[in-house]
Image (cartoon, helix red, strand yellow):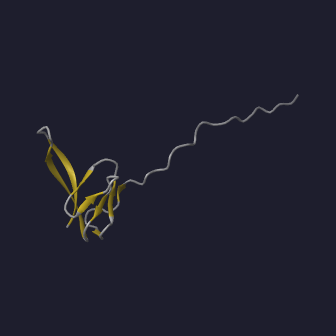
Amino acid sequence: MAHTKSGGSTRLGRDSEGRRLGVKLFGGQKAKIGNIIIRQRGTKFVAGKNVKRGNDDTLFALKEGVVQFVSKNKKRFDGNRKTVKVVSIV
């Protein structure tokens, strides 16, 4: 009897789609009210002046202006200092 071996099934190919995270408006660019500046998981960037953090840690503009990124030393609850990236609208 002539047999053709079955092709079988693969267990691959079920990866999820990318979440499109990252910086959407860079330093020096103009932002309008409500514009998303950064999409992130966790607080890699911290909200500064005229910027607010959404429920999913997204940073967005509260006022119209220019995006500014600054590194600051922030004091932690245990007394140590940590450098954080602060995003502001100037």
63 relative to 80 in the view: left or right: right
Give the residue displayed 60% in from the left and 36% down from the top: 11
Give the residue displayed 25% in from the left and 69% down from the top: 63
| x, y percent for residue 12 | 58, 39
Q: Is residue 73 above or below residue 24?
A: above
| x, y percent for residue 80 | 13, 39
| x, y percent for residue 24 | 35, 60
Q: In this view of the protein, which residue sits in the foreground, 12 or 28? A: 12
> In the rendered image, which quarter is residue 30 located in?
bottom left
Task: Give the residue at the far right of this rendering.
Answer: 1
> In the rendered image, which quarter is residue 36 located in?
bottom left
Give the residue displayed 15% in from the left and 42% down from the top: 76
The number of numbered badges drawn on the structure is 0
75 relative to 26 in the view: left or right: left
| x, y percent for residue 7 | 72, 36
Task: Give the residue at the far left of this rendering.
Answer: 79
Task: Give the residue at the far front of this rendering.
Answer: 55
> The C terminus appears in which quarter of the rendering?
bottom left
Give the residue displayed 32% in from the left and 63% down from the top: 25
> The N terminus appears in which quarter of the rendering?
top right
